Image: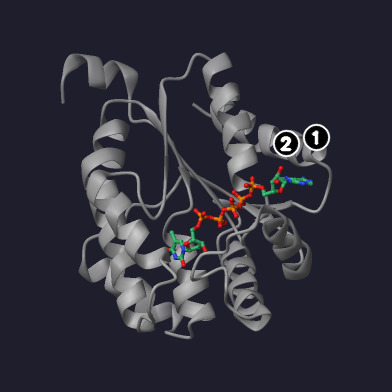
Amino acid sequence: MSLQQSLVGRGKFITLEGLEGVGKTTNRELIESQLSAAGIDFIGTREPGGTPIGEQLRELVLSTRGSMQAETELMIMVASRLELVSQLIEPALAKGQWVLCDRYLDASVAYQGAGRALGVERVLQLHALMGVTLTPDLTLLLDMSVKDGLARMVARGKPDRIENEAVEFFERARQAYLQRAVAEPKRIEVIDASLSKDDVGASVARAVRRLIQSV
Ligand code: T5A
């Protein structure tokens, strides 16, 4: 470790999670402003994607052309994550930068583990096998009813392959997210995403402020 690294310390890793249309992108922008105002050096990224290979994988996995086995979908998500963690997230954290990521491993647990019914344990085992074991310091789970979240998404138009899934798929994913929050209350903060943008933003900002104050 260089002298500068030991002085700065390791950065913090924040993830945003939740179903379609719950406001992850909206709140990602708010957090970015908050971190900038606090003078924190950070990078923002997203999943699937975030690296040149990851962005190609994103296009492939979200394309509406043709069908795909659930296992294939999971492996593409893991491959994109592996690239992102090794090329971008780990090096940034090691340099003392904070990382803000729109979706991460909890999304695979929810969407592939529960939504596609591949099994939560199987999803976690695959990550462990591939060495993707990095855990966020803070996860903001934006939660609201599937119906209302999908309505926001529909208003935006042009659904991708996963957004075309049935309501039951998203209900299973939502329950898996909430179960993870119960199992890891220190890491995962559940935020009521059905409230106004201002109220959701205020809850998000409070959680991020607590993390900033903890260092
Ligand atoms: N996926 C991803 C997996 O299946 N497994 C995985 O492991 C991973 C990593 C990614 C897809 O891949 C899947 C999940 C996804 O299906 P994506 O485009 O990155 O797709 O993610 P989406 O969730 O589809 O992103 P969206 O843009 O649809 O949703 P956001 O970002 O949550 O919502 P946002 O901020 O764009 O807001 C949506 C609309 O609602 C409004 C906004 O202005 C916007 O119009 N809005 C509000 N309106 C009222 N009140 C509020 N509080 C509002 N907040 C936002």
Q: Are marks 1 and 2 in contact (CB under 8 Å)?
A: yes
Compared across the picture, whether 3 is left or right of 74 comes to left
Q: Which residue is mark 1?
A: 198
- Which residue lies at the image location 55% right of the left edge and 60% below the top edge? 184
Left or right of 30 on screen, residue 214: left
The residue at the point 57 percent across, 68 percent down is 163
**Colour mode?**
one colour
| Residue visible at 36% across and 80% down in the picture | 68
| Callout 1: SS | helix
Give the quadrant of residue 120. Answer: bottom left
Residue 122, position as x, y percentages in the image: 36, 81
Residue 132 shows up from this direction: no
Q: Is residue 128 above or below residue 58?
A: below
At horizontal 58% and vertical 77% (from top left) the residue drawn is: 165
Q: Position of residue 93 (x, y in %)?
A: 32, 34
CA–CA distance in space, label 1 to label 2: 5 Å
Compared with residue 103, is residue 70 higher up or lower down, i.e. above or below? below
Label 2 lies in ligand 1 vicinity (Cβ under 8 Å): yes
The residue tagged 2 is 201
**Image quadrant of residue 211?**
top right
Q: Is residue 27 left or right of residue 10?
A: right
